[in-house]
Image (cartoon, grey):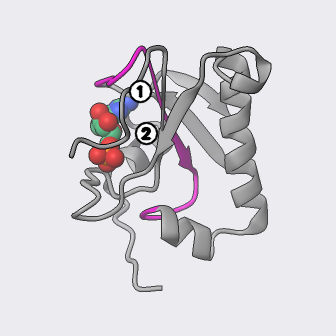
Amino acid sequence: MAYSYDPTNIFARILRGEIPNRTVIETEHTLAFEDINPSAPVHVLVIPKGPYVCFDHFAADASAEEIADFHRAVAGICRKLGISPGEGGQGYRVLSNAGHHGHQEVPHYHMHLLAGRPLGPMLAR
Ligand code: 5GP
């Protein structure tokens, strides 16, 4: 996989404890924290602790344990925040930006979890 990870990126610094964050959930392989510039009443960033640049890098190179931990952490946040439609919540959107066309700003894989209001159509046309 032709990815090289930049350990100076802002999320790497959060993981090293160099920058504070408002943690929502932390597990062995995953950290979730509030986005500093929220786009919705709920805007959580979920990141693996390992050095993965974007979604396909993580999906290709992370261990099965890391991948399961990451997704179970997302489910745990949905439960914790009461947004799971399966449990009476109003729903949410997950998305992940990758690379230039994806408008990714921070080169450490992260999933945005957005909720708390109707989120509108998926993309502006
Ligand atoms: P991207 O465009 O890479 O998908 O999203 C990066 C996200 O990281 C943005 O929503 C931005 O607000 C958030 N962000 C950038 N720097 C920080 C930071 O220092 N702390 C937190 N909590 N979020 C950040």
Q: Is residue 43 inside the magenta stretch?
A: yes
Quadrant assignment, res 6: bottom left
Q: Tell me: is circle 2 under 8 Å from ligand 1.
A: yes
Q: Foreground: 125 or 24? A: 125
How many C-alpha atoms fall within 10 Å of the one at disc 1: few (<14), some, or many (≥20)? few
Q: Are marks 1 and 2 in contact (CB under 8 Å)?
A: yes
Q: Please, what is the dominant secondary structure of the magenta stretch? A: loop
Mark 2 is on which residue type?
Ile
Q: Is residue 26 visible?
A: yes
| Residue nearer the viewer, 43 or 4 | 43
Image location (x, y in percent) of residue 88: 74, 14
Q: Which residue: 43% across, 39% down?
A: 14
Q: Which residue is mark 1?
A: 20
Q: Residue at x 75, y 43 (%)?
A: 72
Label 2, on which residue?
Answer: 14
Distance of mark 1 from mark 2, alpha carbons?
A: 6 Å
Residue drawn at x 48%, y 85% as measured from the top left:
1
- Ligand 1: image quarter: top left
The residues colored magenta run: 37-54
Q: Earlier in the sequence, mark 1 or mark 2?
A: 2
Q: Element at badge 2?
A: helix
State the image coordinates of residue 56 (x, y, percent, origin top left). Answer: 50, 70
Q: Secondary structure at mark 1?
A: loop
